[in-house]
Image (cartoon, rainbow, N blue to C red):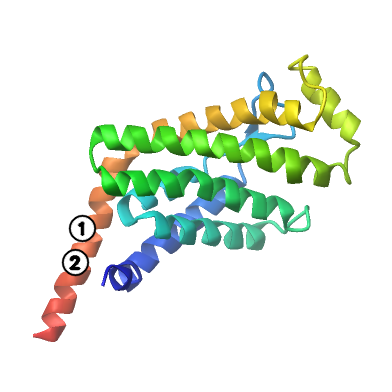
């Protein structure tokens, strides 16, 4: 029954809308040169997805992440052989899914804060491992690995290999991203969730009227 409610026409429309909005936001990114080299850009695409995840649950979060990537590929074709898009999907899910699960269990202000903090921490950890094991070795096909590491060392002198790069550049970058996304989500969630739930209630009323 819960799955049927999630996959209702109204909810699918909401997930599609939020996923498409996230795709547009994904196109606009800005660097944080005091944390990571300029080829790492911060975007706010996780904000609508986190809002939708809190409202509809973690499964909806995965669906919206997938919609985001598909729409983004329509708007801007891949330049990384789909590896960058796949990584974005995995890193995004690593934040919104744990956050969604925790919030579903504790739908309070404290629960929301804990959910976003956990999501930020998990995304940062997955980002460190994913960059060290997959992303940096892959991007070394386009840019010499020594140049990538040198760009990181110019910001953090402790950088000397892919793991220290991921730990000192990517980790803090994702923590800041998670904090920014969480703060914006906290500011807009209540207002948007009221709109989502009103749409859901209207849909249920229509179904009841049809049955009668």
- State the image quarter where residue 43 is shown: top right
Q: Regarding mark 2 in the picture, which secondary structure is present there?
A: helix
**Tag 1 residue:** 198
**Left or right of 23, for residue 162:** right
| Residue 28 percent across, percent down from the top left | 61, 41
Instruction: Give the CA distance from mark 2 to mark 1.
Output: 6 Å
Q: Regarding mark 1 in the picture, which secondary structure is present there?
A: helix
- State the image quarter where residue 77 is shown: bottom right
| Residue 157 percent across, percent down from the top left | 78, 14
Quadrant location, the C terminus: bottom left
**Tag 2 residue:** 202
Q: Residues within 10 Å of mark 1 (few under 14, many from 20)?
A: few
Give the number of the disc on residue 116.
none
Are the residues flagged by discs 2 and 1 in contact, CB closer than 8 Å?
yes
**Left or right of 148, for residue 99:** left
Residue 181 against residue 79 in the figure, above or below: above
Residue at 59% over, 53% down:
89
**Left or right of 114, for residue 166:** right
Residue at 57% over, 34% down:
124
Residue 187 visible in the shown view: no
Residue 200 visible in the shown view: yes
| Residue 63 percent across, percent down from the top left | 47, 62
């Amino acid at each position: 029954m819960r799955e049927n409610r999630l996959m209702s026409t109204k909810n699918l429309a909401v997930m599609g809308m939020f996923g498409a909005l996230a795709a547009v936001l994904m196109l606009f990114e800005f660097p944080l040169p005091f944390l990571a080299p300029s080829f790492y850009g911060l975007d706010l695409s996780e904000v609508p997805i986190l809002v939708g995840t809190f409202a509809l649950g973690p499964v909806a979060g995965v669906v919206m992440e997938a919609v985001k990537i598909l729409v983004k590929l329509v708007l801007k074709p891949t330049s990384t052989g789909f590896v960058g898009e796949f990584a974005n999907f995995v890193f995004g899910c690593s934040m919104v899914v744990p956050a969604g699960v925790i919030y579903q269990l504790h739908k309070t202000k404290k629960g929301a804060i804990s959910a976003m903090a956990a999501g930020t921490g998990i995304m940062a950890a997955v980002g460190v491992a994913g960059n060290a094991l997959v992303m940096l070795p892959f991007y070394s096909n386009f840019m010499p690995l020594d140049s990538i590491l040198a760009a990181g060392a110019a910001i953090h002198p402790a950088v000397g290999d892919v793991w220290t790069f991921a730990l000192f550049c990517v980790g803090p970058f994702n923590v800041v991203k998670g904090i920014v996304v969480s703060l914006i989500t906290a500011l807009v969630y209540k207002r948007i969730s009221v709109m989502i739930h009103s749409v859901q209630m209207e849909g249920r009323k229509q179904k009841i009227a049809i049955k009668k």
